[in-house]
Image: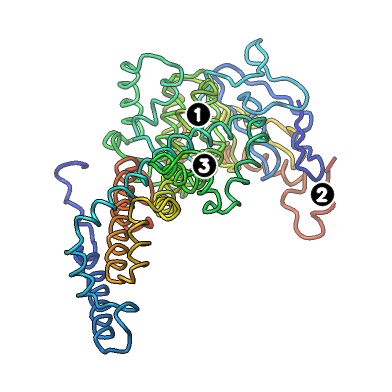
Amino acid sequence: MMAPAAPSVRRRRRPNFAVYVYPVVTVAVLFVVWELLARAGYFPRYILPAPTGIAARFVQFKGLIARELLVTMEETLVGFALSVVFGIPLAMALCASRTFNCAVYPLLIGSQVVPKVALAPLFLLWFGFGLTSKALIVFLVAFFPIVVDTIVGLSSTEPGKLYVARAAGATPLQLFWRVRLPNALPAIFGGMKVAITLAVVGAIVGDFIAAESGIGRLLLSANGNMDTELLFAAILALIAAGIVLFLLMEAVEKLALPWHISQRRDGSGAAP
Amino acid sequence: MSKEYDTGDGVIRALDGVSLDLDDGEFLSIVGPSGCGKSTLMLIAAGLVPATSGTVTIGVTPVSRPVTNAGIAFQDATLYEWRRVLENVLLPVEIQRRDLKPFRRRARELLAMVGMADFERKYPFQLSGGMRQRVALCRALIHDPPLLLMDEPFGALDALSREQLNLELQDLWQQNRKTVLLITHSIQEAVFLSDRVAVMSPRPGRIAEIVAIDLPRPRTFDLIEAPEFGRYSRRIREVFASWGVFARGPERQAPARAR
C-alpha cells in the first residue's frame, strides 16, 4: 500500500473461525437439549416436536416449502424494492420542500400509527389476492424506516462540509449530489437493513390475510392440521431466508461504503 | 459591519462595528478570545453567512453570495469521508466544472509539497489529524484562489504538527502570494505568519487594535526567541489584558475597559 520496502503491517485479528464456531455450537447445544426434552415424553408431539422429527418432515415436504418460500420471498423483495424506490425520493422531497413536508408528513405518520394488519384486508379488497396487494402490504411496513433514516442522513450534514463546497461556488443541486446525498448513505443503508427484516414480516402478514399462497398460508394450514412438525420446518426455513436477505443487504452495504466507520476491519467500527 | 444572531431566547450581538481592509497579497491574522465572533467574521467575509448590517467588498464588488473563488479551511478538516485524498483535493475544481486533467497534476504537486505524495489513494479515515489538515489545505489551494480564508486550521493539532504546518503554510504562501485571512487564538502563530494581526475584543467582537508585524521572511522558529518577536506578542497580550480577557474571578465582571 505504501512504499514496497516498508515492513508489512500485520493485522492483529482474532481467529476468524470463532465467528462461525460460536454460533454453530450455541445452536447445536440448543437442538440437543430440545431433542432430549422432546423425547423425555413430558410434551405431546403437537406441542413440542423433536428436531429430528422436524427435519424428517422438512425433507418430506421440501418441494412444497421451497415453492411457498419462493412466493413469500418474491413478495418481500418486490415490496422492499418499492420501499427503496419510493422511500428515498420521498425523503429527499420532504427535506427539499418545506411546503411538501408540512403537507405530507402528518399523512406519513398516520400511515404508520395505524396497525398495518388492519389495512391488509382493505388492500386485498382493492388489489385482489395476487402479488400486488401483498407487495403493497410489504411496502407499507418497510418504507417508513427508509424514509426516516434518509431524512436523518440528509439533514445531518456538517455545516463545514457545505461551506467548503459553497465557497467554491457550488449550486444547490451540486450541494445535494456531491455532499448531502453521499453523506446520508450510511444512514440510508441503516434504514434499508431495518426495512429488509420488516419486509419479511409484511409478506407473512399478507400471506396470512390472503391465505392463498406463500409460507404464511403454509403456516396456517400446518397449524390447522396440528402438524406442528411442518409448522416448525416452515418457520425454520423462513428464519434461514430472512438471515440470507439481511446478509445480502450487509454485503451490498460493504461494497457501497468501503469508507464508512462500520466497514473498517481494524475493530474501530461496530461490525464484527 | 455587524452581525446579530437570534438564538430563540434573545438576540446575541456577535460582531459590532467591525471594519477591516485586506490588502492584495497580504497575510492578515485575527486573534481573539473564544466567542468573540472571529469565525463569524470569516464566514461573512466568504459570503457564506449574511451580515446583519454593513457590507463586505472584495475589490469593488459587494459580497452577497458566496465568494466563488475563495479557498477555505476549518479547524475540523471537513474532508468528505467517501472520497479518497486526491478526489477530496479536486473537489473545488469539480464544482467549478473545470477540466480536471491539469488540476490532477497540480493536486499531486500540492500534496507532495506537504509530504502527502504517497497518500493520494487513501480515505480520510486512514489518515492522522495532521495529514487530514494538510489535505484540507491542498483542497483550499487547488483552484488557485486569490483569497484564502482559514479558521483555526491547526487548532486541533498537537504543538509539533502545528509548527510544521505553520512552516509549510508560510512556504505555500511565499510561492503564491495570496491574500490570506487566518483566524487563530494562538498569538505565536499569528505573529509568526502574518503581515498584520488584528486583535479582537470579547463579544460583541470589534477590532481592538491592528498590529503590523515587521519581521523578515522566511521566518523560522528561532525567531520566536528573538526580542522583536516577544515585543509583538506582548503588545497583543496587553490589548487582551486591557479588555479583561485574562482577568480572574470577580475582576472578570468589571474589565478595565469594556464598552
Give the distance between the C-alpha atoms of the residues marked 3 and 2, in whole angstroms: 53 Å
Front one among A256 and B88:
A256
Among the 4 quarters of the image, the one containing residue A50? bottom left
Residue A147's tag is 3
Q: Amino acid at mark 1?
A: Phe
Q: Is residue A129 above or below residue A17?
A: above
Distance in Å between CA atoms under marks 2 and 1: 47 Å
At label 2, which amino acid type do we have? Pro
Q: Mark 2, chain letter? A: B
The residue that label 1 is drawn on is A176
Q: Are marks 3 and 2 in contact (CB under 8 Å)?
A: no
Disc 2 secondary structure class: loop
Task: Look at 14% across and 44% down and name the residue there.
Answer: A5
Which residue is farthest front?
A225
Depth check, mark 1 against mark 3: the one in front is 3
Label 2, residues with CA under 10 Å away: few <14, some 14-19, many ≥20: some
> Which residue, given by chain and number where applicable, does mark 2 sit on?
B255
| Image position, residue A101 (x, y; %) | 64, 35
Residue at screen point 37% across, 40% down: A78
The picture quadrant where one finds residue A84 is: top left
